[in-house]
Amino acid sequence: MRRGDVRAALLSLLAERGRNGYQMIQEIQSRSHGIWRPSPGSVYPALQQLEDEGLIAGTDSGGSRTYELTGKGRGHIAEHGDVLVNTWSEVAGSLPEEMMELRMLWARLGDAFAQLTQVATPEQLAAARRLLKTTRRSIFAILAEGGDEEEEEQ
């Protein structure tokens, strides 16, 4: 996504409530169904720019910086709200339906992986390693053959 889209997404989230940068990155990823996860290198400079423009204000608390809209920011939202709403629809429409489903499956796999790394036994970790190695090879086989393993599964 373009830098302006990052700004629009951040403003859209801050119109709802104050958040820190990490929370905004997570929320953008969640709302885009894993399609878009802006990097800290794009989010934090955009937050700084919005703060410099007087549209948001940041306060430090507990080792984190929470951002909120200022009065000027709320006026900007009122004036450009339609653009902010379109940010999410642009992201959602940026991928074909079948690719969106694949990304959602990938995001769910990421959730399972995060859980695995926190609670798995050594045996479960070994089984997961084998599965991931096999899955990687299978994906490359699909690309090499141009085949469709999904039909075989059904």
Image: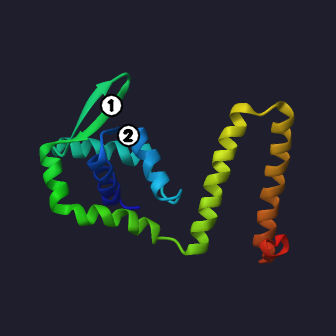
Q: Is residue 13 left or right of residue 150?
A: left
What is the x, y in percent for residue 4? 30, 59
* Mark 2 secondary-structure assignment: helix
Which residue is depicted at the point 47% across and 45% down?
26
Give the CA distance from mark 1 to mark 2: 7 Å
**Mark positioned earlier in the residue sequence (1 or 2):** 2
Query: In the rendered image, which residue does mark 1 sit on?
Result: 65
Query: Can you see residue 148?
Result: yes
**Residue neighbourhood size for the residue with mark 1, other residues' Cα within 10 Å, grouped as few (<14), some (14–19), many (≥20):** some
The three-letter amino acid code for the residue at tag 2 is Gly
- Which image quarter: residue 5? bottom left
Query: Can you see residue 37?
Result: no
The three-letter amino acid code for the residue at tag 1 is Arg
For residue 136, above or below residue 100:
above
**Viewer-side residue, 113 vs 38:** 113
Locate the C terminus and report the quarter of the image it occupies: bottom right
What is the x, y in percent for residue 61? 32, 24
Residue at the far top in the pictured view? 62
Query: In the rendered image, which residue does mark 2 sit on?
Result: 21
Which residue is depicted at the point 70% across and 36% down?
117
Which residue is depicted at the point 61% across and 67% down?
101
**Residue neighbourhood size for the residue with mark 2, other residues' Cα within 10 Å, grouped as few (<14), some (14–19), many (≥20):** some
What is the x, y in percent for residue 122? 84, 31
